[in-house]
């Protein structure tokens, strides 16, 4: 990765040609009608959820909502959608940056505009999608207790600021459909006794109405009580609150709730959403007497929403956020074509930490060998860190308890906090490591030189770039930010260790020093990111073969969907040099000359074997040098 920073600075990206929805519906055009088979499928889902009578009652209203949405489409959008190929919904060019709308601090602009300009400056072309974490008015949980689903928080900007980003980037919005703020109009009307909202929430006259046996069965992501008392016009009520007393769960047993959520999702699409993240969808449908997670009704709602976004023909993708054990997580793919388009790869972060902490890639390699997307229109969202931290549930059934304990111990020694959930035996169980990714892989007071720490950091991040799927990068992982312990002291919120604000001025100042941490991360990561987005072999539909070359090395052979391009990726997960001998037969190739995409260095096979030396935390991406384009250096 020996490249000058100026090479990345030479990249220039121009706004894409976009087609926007019309602000007002045009009812002079032919109204949209659902295809008969789609209508019957959606009606069948309503029958499953609500029974024959209510399905017959609410299906016409669902159709009306879809007609209104379609009437906002300009003719050129309708024509463009005729050429849409669902197999190309995601490609090697997709990389998602995850950020809060106000996380970058600047002067003279709205926070959303500051973020936009900052990403344009720092990105250098690799990122093509922005995941804007909830930008609505909220009362707690850093945006996830939404007060109004249709408004942009005026502290951040306006819908015009959101749409301006659409000119350059695809956009990913949060659909916080599981719950709403206790300060919302919806919940206030419930408290006021408005009969329309009587069944919008799950409420009891007494906390004892939920029996101890029923309580014991509920899967809990928190240690707080599942019921919270509120005083209403009709007296005290105990309301279902999965996450906090300020986040009131919707009652999806009421079809009015489903229709309101559907309207909100279509509103987001009209205002720029290309991807909709279904937040905490695991807990969407609550049923006393069950675990109230992963219920068949929850999956059926996701399938209905998939029918909705597919029927409006916009190429919008649904992503399910289900931070649970891997097998349960991937169940949200459905059959690969009827549920989520993309699922978070929540097992990956803990497995990568394990590989680098233990300096042993074998468990990571074995797991990667076994996973694959269920169809050519579904894929994984490969993340290492998010705004919450590093989840442990995804790897729960892959790593041993001893390994999980070791990961927690190592991370806490580096300044991480640990969040807990309620286990089946009512004891607390580690649920999440709260840390930035930089601090997870580097000790704050390490005597190591900066170059080594940066290379280890970049090596860990390379794993999410090479395996099948689409990489998602949280902004603090993008920049290598260290833990913000002062913010945790101020707020008392463990997750805030990973949610500190970024000063645009300080970033720009640090980038003037080519030897600074930020400059080195930008250089090395930037080279990886651009190489990935420029190589068809990294397409989510491309082939993947895990090579077991050495416990020290995570090795993946990627192929383009057309099988006309191959890339061998090698990542040294240790601080020691690693010497490899790789048979061309294992690479399914007869090409003797290979070029490293990251350094242009060459390696030539001798007697059908590539011999490579990987430096500590080294990363090499080899492709057959068919045109003799590499330089004279060797690897």
Image (spheres, rainbow, N blue to C red):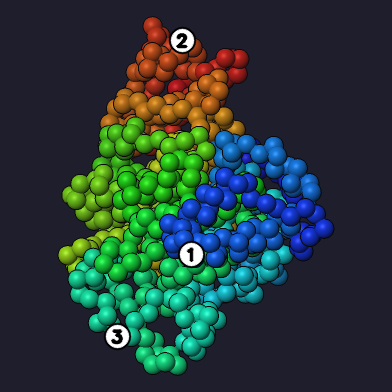
For the residues labelled 3 and 2, the Cα–Cα distance comes to: 73 Å
Compare residues 555 and 524 and report the one nearer the observer.
555
For the residues labelled 3 and 1, the Cα–Cα distance comes to: 31 Å
Identify the residue at image location x=33%, y=66%: 287
Asked which secondary structure carries label 2, the reply is: loop
Compare residues 285 and 151 and report the one nearer the observer.
285
Compare residues 306 and 256 and report the one nearer the observer.
256
Identify the residue at image location x=52%, y=38%: 377
Residue 414: % across, % down: 31, 57
Identify the residue at image location x=37%, y=17%: 586
3 and 2 marks in contact (CB < 8 Å):
no
3 or 1: tag closer to the N-terminus? 1
Q: Which quadrant of the rendered structure holds the C terminus?
A: top left
2 and 1 marks in contact (CB < 8 Å):
no
Residue 134: % across, % down: 54, 65
2 or 1: tag closer to the N-terminus? 1
Quarter of the view holding residue 556: top left
Asked which secondary structure carries label 1, the reply is: helix
Identify the residue at image location x=38%, y=46%: 330
Which residue ends up furthest to the top in the rendered image?
Answer: 607
Residue under circle 3? 206
Residue under circle 1? 53
3 or 2: tag closer to the N-terminus? 3
Quarter of the view holding residue 579: top left
For the residues labelled 2 and 1, the Cα–Cα distance comes to: 65 Å
| Left or right: 147, with 83 as reference point | left
| Left or right: 599, with 406 as reference point | right
Decide if residue 165 is in sight here: no
Residue 590 bears which disc, if any?
2
**Is the residue 516 above or below the residue 526 in the image?**
below
């Amino acid at each position: 990765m020996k490249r000058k920073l100026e090479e990345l600075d030479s990249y220039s990206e121009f706004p894409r040609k976009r087609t926007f929805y019309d602000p007002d519906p045009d009812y002079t055009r032919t109204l949209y009608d659902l295809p008969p088979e789609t209508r019957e499928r959606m009606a069948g889902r309503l029958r499953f959820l609500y029974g024959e009578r209510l399905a017959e009652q609410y299906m016409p209203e669902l159709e009306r909502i879809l007609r209104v949405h379609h009437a906002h489409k300009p003719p050129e959008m309708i024509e463009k959608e005729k050429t849409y190929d669902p197999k190309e919904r995601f490609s090697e060019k997709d990389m998602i940056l995850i950020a809060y709308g106000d996380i970058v601090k600047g002067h003279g602009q709205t926070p959303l505009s500051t973020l936009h300009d900052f990403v344009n400056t720092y990105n250098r072309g690799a990122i093509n999608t922005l995941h804007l974490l909830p930008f609505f008015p909220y009362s707690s949980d850093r945006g996830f207790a939404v007060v109004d689903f249709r408004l942009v928080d005026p502290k951040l900007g306006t819908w015009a600021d959101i749409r301006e980003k659409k000119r350059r980037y695809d956009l990913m919005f949060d659909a916080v459909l599981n719950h709403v703020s206790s300060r919302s109009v919806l919940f206030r009307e419930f408290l006021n006794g408005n009969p329309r909202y009587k069944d919008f929430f799950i409420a009891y006259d007494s906390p004892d109405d939920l029996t101890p046996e029923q309580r014991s069965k509920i899967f809990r992501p928190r240690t707080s009580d599942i019921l919270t008392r509120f005083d209403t016009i009709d007296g005290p009520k105990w309301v279902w609150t999965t996450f906090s007393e300020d986040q009131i769960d919707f009652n999806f047993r009421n079809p009015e709730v489903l229709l309101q959520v559907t309207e909100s999702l279509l509103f987001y699409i009209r205002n720029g959403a290309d991807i909709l993240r279904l937040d905490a969808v695991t807990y969407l449908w609550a049923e006393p007497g069950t675990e109230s997670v992963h219920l068949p009704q929850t999956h059926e709602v996701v399938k209905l929403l998939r029918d909705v976004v597919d029927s409006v023909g916009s190429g919008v993708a649904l992503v399910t956020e289900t931070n649970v054990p891997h097998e349960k997580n991937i169940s949200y793919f459905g059959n690969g074509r009827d549920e989520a388009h993309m699922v978070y790869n929540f097992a990956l972060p803990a497995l990568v930490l394990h590989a680098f902490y233990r300096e042993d890639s074998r468990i990571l390699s074995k797991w990667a060998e076994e996973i694959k997307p269920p169809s050519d229109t579904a894929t994984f969202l490969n993340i290492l860190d998010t705004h919450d931290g590093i989840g442990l549930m995804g790897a729960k059934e892959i790593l041993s308890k001893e390994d999980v304990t070791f990961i927690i111990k190592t991370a806490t020694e580096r300044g991480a906090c640990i969040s807990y959930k309620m286990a089946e035996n009512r004891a607390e169980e580690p649920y999440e490591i709260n840390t930035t990714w930089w601090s997870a892989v580097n000790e704050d007071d390490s005597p190591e030189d900066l170059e080594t720490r940066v290379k280890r950091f970049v090596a860990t991040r390379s794993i999410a770039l090479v395996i099948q799927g689409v990489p998602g990068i949280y902004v603090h992982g993008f920049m290598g930010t260290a833990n913000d312990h002062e913010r945790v002291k101020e707020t008392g919120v463990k997750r805030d260790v990973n949610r500190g604000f970024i000063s645009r001025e300080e970033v720009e100042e640090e980038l003037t020093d080519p030897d600074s941490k930020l400059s080195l991360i930008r250089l090395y990561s930037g080279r990886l990111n651009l190489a990935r987005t420029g190589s068809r072999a990294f397409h989510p539909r491309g082939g993947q073969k895990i090579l077991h070359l050495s416990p020290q090395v995570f090795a993946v052979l990627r192929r383009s969907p057309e099988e006309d391009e191959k890339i061998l990726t090698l990542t040294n997960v240790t601080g020691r040099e690693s010497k490899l001998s790789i048979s061309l037969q294992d690479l399914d190739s007869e090409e003797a000359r290979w070029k490293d995409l990251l350094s242009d260095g060459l390696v030539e096979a001798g007697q059908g074997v590539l011999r490579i030396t990987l430096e500590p935390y080294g990363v090499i991406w080899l492709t057959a040098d068919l045109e003799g384009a590499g330089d004279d250096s060797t690897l």
